[in-house]
Image: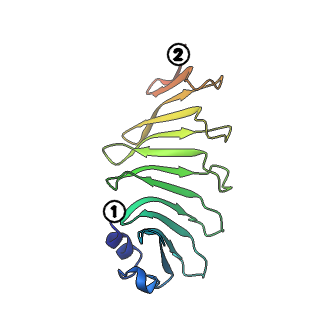
Amino acid sequence: MSLLTLASAFGCSSSGPEDGAEAAGVKATYSKASGKLELITYDTNKDGKVDAWSRMDGTRLVSMEIDRDFDGIVDRWEHYSAGGALEKVGFSRAKDGKADAWAFQGDDGQIARIEVSTNRDGKVNRVKFYEIGVLASVELDTNHDGRPDRRLTYGPDGVKSEKLR
């Protein structure tokens, strides 16, 4: 996503570092060393508090942190590829500002998998796989060695469990 697209989405006009790029709750921060855009903050609900932070590398969107429920705690983390595509979305199942699950979309635009750190330590130990938006299987790392050892498969005949190793 380009800066112009991002600025348009936020309802502001494009501007350069000389004027601070501040308009309607939007503020741009530029690197003092390189002059490149580093951060765009935005008050989406116009309550006077920033609730969206866009990390930038010049005109390239790198990541976003968003407080979707306006409680002062970030609850969504978006990461973008060098080409501008959304790679993954992090969220906090405990709603405490710490990402413990990450969603990935497939080529069809629907959710393809969700990786979960049930211990909230950043180590994925549960992966849910989706087909056409429907939960198809879950792989579990029950002994926490970094590799799945159990799979649950969901189908018309119910849930099947299998040991992987």
Q: What residue is shown with label 1?
A: 1
Quadrant location, the C terminus: top right
As helix, strand or loop, the secondary structure at mark 2 comes to: loop
At 37% from the left and 70% from the top, the residue drawn is 6
Q: Is residue 123 above or below residue 61?
A: above
Q: For the residue carrying disc 1, how many other residues have a C-alpha within 10 Å: few (<14), some (14-19), or many (20+)?
A: some
Q: x and y percent of residue 130 in the render?
A: 43, 37
As helix, strand or loop, the secondary structure at mark 1 comes to: loop
151 vs 14, nearest the viewer: 14
Nearest to the eye among marks 2 and 1: give it.
1
Real-space Cα separation, disc 2 to disc 1, in angstroms: 40 Å
Q: For the residue carrying disc 2, how many other residues have a C-alpha within 10 Å: few (<14), some (14-19), or many (20+)?
A: few
Q: Along the horizontal axis of the image, is 75 left or right of 18? A: right
2 vs 128, nearest the viewer: 2
Q: Is residue 125 above or below residue 150?
A: below
Q: Mark 1 belongs to which amino acid?
A: Met
Q: What residue is shown with label 2?
A: 164
Mark closest to the chain's N terminus, 2 or 1: 1
Q: Along the horizontal axis of the image, is 2 left or right of 101? A: left
At 67% from the left and 50% from the top, the residue drawn is 94
At 36% from the left and 40% from the top, the residue drawn is 132
Q: x and y percent of residue 19 in the render?
A: 43, 86
Q: Mark 2 belongs to which amino acid?
A: Leu
Q: x and y percent of residue 163 in the render?
A: 55, 15
Q: Along the horizontal axis of the image, is 80 left or right of 144? A: left
Quadrant location, the N terminus: bottom left
Q: How many marks?
A: 2
